[in-house]
Image (cartoon, coloured by chain):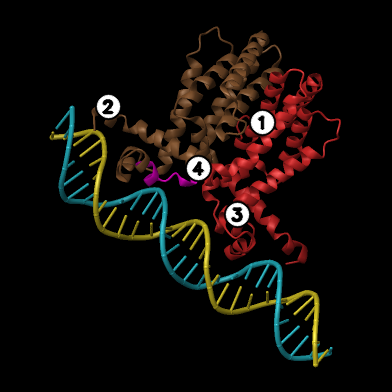
Chain colours: A red, B brown, C yellow, D cyan
Amino acid sequence: MALAERTNNRARILDAARRIVEQRGTAHLTIEAVAAEAALSKGGVIYHYGSKRALLAALRDAALEDLSARYAEQPADTSALAAWLRAHRASTAAPPALGAAMLANAAEDPEMLDPLRRFVRARLDDVVAEAADPDLARLMFLAVLGLRFDEMFGLVGFRSEELTRLEARLEAFAEALGT
Amino acid sequence: MALAERTNNRARILDAARRIVEQRGTAHLTIEAVAAEAALSKGGVIYHYGSKRALLAALRDAALEDLSARYAEQPADTSALAAWLRAHRASTAAPPALGAAMLANAAEDPEMLDPLRRFVRARLDDVVAEAADPDLARLMFLAVLGLRFDEMFGLVGFRSEELTRLEARLEAFAEALGT
DNA sequence: TTAACTGTACTGACCGGTCAGTACAGCCGA
DNA sequence: TCGGCTGTACTGACCGGTCAGTACAGTTAA
């Protein structure tokens, strides 16, 4: 195996875990299954993450940091609601998937969702603080969350064309809601 | 044990499963844990549901039938969006909790969510069909979903007073959206 | 009598975690 | 420049334990 592949094994393990959750469900997320999916041994996975719980926490933190970074990288003049929407849109496409991380962490111990809860509450506060109509802003914030969860469970499964229209509509609300 | 308690044991088992998922996570949802929570033996749980998978499916079906019944029981002149909102409001408070059922079924096998997916898509179709502004209707539909998922993961955790205001706002949208 | 259990005793599969050992790149002092 | 040493990244065998499911004899209440 080439060096580049070998040094990226930590990330590859997380990506393997994500695929297992999405395709088979968290009940089948075992260290052995992750190892097989990432094409290494069980010992190799343990070597990198120490324990299953630590692996789960790493999966959560990677997803949260990704979302957080995408939120922070929005231009300073972006409204909080538009930033919230765009951060989700940007992080939904690429791994690490927040949905898989939430499912896996909630399955192991609901308290492991705490860092995520803090992040979501802080973002809602941002959105509400700058909105002319706070309740409408909360509803739009929830619509973005609904979009995310819908994708997570494959409920409606909007077509990309519908998604684009819905996101444009949310952008319009974000603009109209600015103080 | 009195008759009423004994004949309701099938429902009590489902309720016990729900509490375990909510408090400890689906990874700790074992037949023995359910039996202990429902104050029954492991054999008793197996006697009623046959297998863990069947228990999970029963949990899902009970939650879905509850939501479906509450949707259907709305007066005929209620808009689909208002019915969607009210069905969720009515079924969120009482067991069987859809959230726990979704988590547990998705953990075991993501395909077990299929009946739920069909229901959600049918409800969205209802809402879109009668809306003067279909995309706005979709957004409001998603906001209701967002509210449900938010509760499921305890993300924002809105206060009941905020919830009441948000629901009133959604009702207002439902009325304005009618064709 | 029968439905609805309980309790006990298993089986076989699987799971998380440990451990000894391997491979190998790179450093470092003589 | 070469032998010894270190750190990183694993592998594969294994252990103690848990889990779903089976089997079955006995109990209890209507």
- Are there few (<14), some (14-19), or many (20+) residues within 10 Å of tag 4? many
Q: Is residue B21 left or right of residue A155?
A: left
User: Helix, strand, or loop for circle 4?
Assistant: loop
Residue at point 76% right, 66% down? Answer: A2
**Pointer 1 indicates a residue of which chain?**
A
Residues at discs 2 and 4 both on one chain:
yes
The answer to which of A165 and A8 lies nearer the viewer is A8
Return the chain for callout 2. Answer: B
Chain holding disc 3: A
Give the CA distance from mark 3 to mark 1.
26 Å
- What whole-number distance in Å separates the C-alpha atoms at marks 1 and 2? 42 Å
Residue B25, numbered circle: 4
- Of residue A100 and residue A121, the one placed in the foreground of this image is A121
Residue B16 lies in the magenta stretch? no
Amino acid at dot 4: Gly
Secondary structure category for the residue under label 2? helix
Tag 2: residue type?
Ala
| Mark 3 nearby-residue class (10 Å; few <14, some 14–19, many ≥20) | few
Say which residue label 1 marks: A145
Q: Same chain for marks 1 and 2?
A: no
Give yes or no for contact between labels 2 and 4 (Cβ–Cβ under 8 Å).
Answer: no
Q: Is residue A35 above or below residue A174?
A: below
Residues shaded magenta: B26-35
Whether marks 1 and 4 lie on the same chain: no
Q: Which residue is mark 2?
A: B4
> Of the residues under marks 2 and 4, which one precedes in the sequence?
2
In the picture of the structure, the residue carrying the numbered disc 3 is A54
Q: CA distance from mark 4 to mark 3?
A: 16 Å
**Mark 4 and mark 3 on one chain:** no
Identify whether C21 is placed above or below A175.
below
User: In 3D space, how far apart are the residues under numbered discs 2 and 4 (Cα atoms)?
Assistant: 29 Å
Q: What amino acid does circle 1 point to?
A: Leu
